[in-house]
Image (cartoon, rainbow, N blue to C red):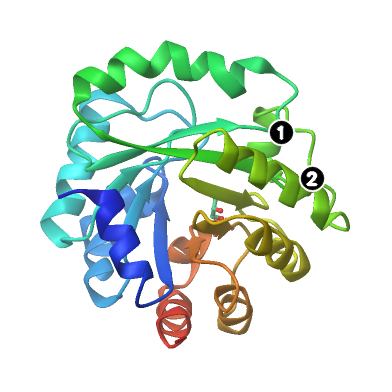
Amino acid sequence: MNVEEYIKNRLRKEKLHFTLIDPDSETAKDTKKLSLLKEINTDAILIGGSTQVRGEELDDIIKSIKKITTVPIIIFPGGVGGISRYADAIFFMSLLNSRNPYFITKAQALGAFQVKSSGLETLPMGYLIVSPGETAGFIGEADLLPRNKPKIAAAYALAAQYMGMRFVYLEAGSGASEPVPLEMIKYVKKAVDIPVIVGGGIKEKEKAEEISRIADILVTGTIAEENFDKLKEIVNAVKGIR
Ligand code: 1GP
């Protein structure tokens, strides 16, 4: 399957929801919990986290997710490790607002040949971390995008597009107390033509609906761990938008 075509075709008709699974989480290791994924209408599974599960352990987790769902599995790498040829694609991403060039281009160079030999489809993505940023912001040494300065986020997103990236991700950080502000998502959407992905701190269906009215793709992670019924509500809210 060509994952980019799949995403872009679906985006012509509807807003998308991606479920992020941390390979180090309870859900990833518990087949009963994983099988709940069958009950939701999510459009792709992202595999990633700031911790480093790799090698055979990661391959096995992806294989068991594949038995449960037919939606694409996309690696959302937290670093140079964490690549598995059993996934369908990888977000080949650059943390554009990092202060450390390691996260902008060096980790990408170090991982490039590994990605090539894995045969994974690459989805070039500009990754932008918005305050509070949580673990991703700390680890990625981000100059957190100020929540009250949407134009700065839009400028970075447009730069991502002009550099040839085909997706842009606005990240408030996993477990953030508040998601990316709506005003910022609006600004970014107006500025770019590439799909805008938004994640971090989305816990309620009302918020999910507000965000999905503007953004193209909404990502939730923590809620799958904490409250599966709420995850279902969020996915239904996203899918209800026309
Ligand atoms: C992390 O944006 C995602 O990259 C998910 O965040 O865990 O807060 O849903 P949550």
In the foreground, 237 or 128: 128
Disc assigned to residue 97: 1
Residue 196 in which image quadrant: bottom right
Amino acid type for the residue under numbered disc 2: Leu
Ligand 1 within 8 A of label 2's CB?
no
The alpha-carbon separation of the residues under discs 2 and 1 comes to 8 Å
Disc assigned to residue 145: 2
User: How crowded is the residue under tag 1: few (<14 C-alpha within 10 Å), some, or many (20+)?
Assistant: many
In the foreground, 67 or 100: 100
**Does 182 sit left or right of 18 as displayed?**
right
User: How crowded is the residue under tag 2: few (<14 C-alpha within 10 Å), some, or many (20+)?
Assistant: many
Q: Position of residue 28 (x, y in %)?
A: 32, 49
174 lies above or below 37? above
Residue, far right: 148
**Does 36 sit left or right of 168 as displayed?**
left
**SS for tag 2?**
loop
Residue 24 in which image quadrant: top left
Q: Position of residue 77 (x, y in %)?
A: 43, 34
Q: Position of residue 12 (x, y in %)?
A: 36, 72
Amino acid type for the residue under numbered disc 1: Asn
3 lies above or below 36? above
In the foreground, 165 or 77: 165
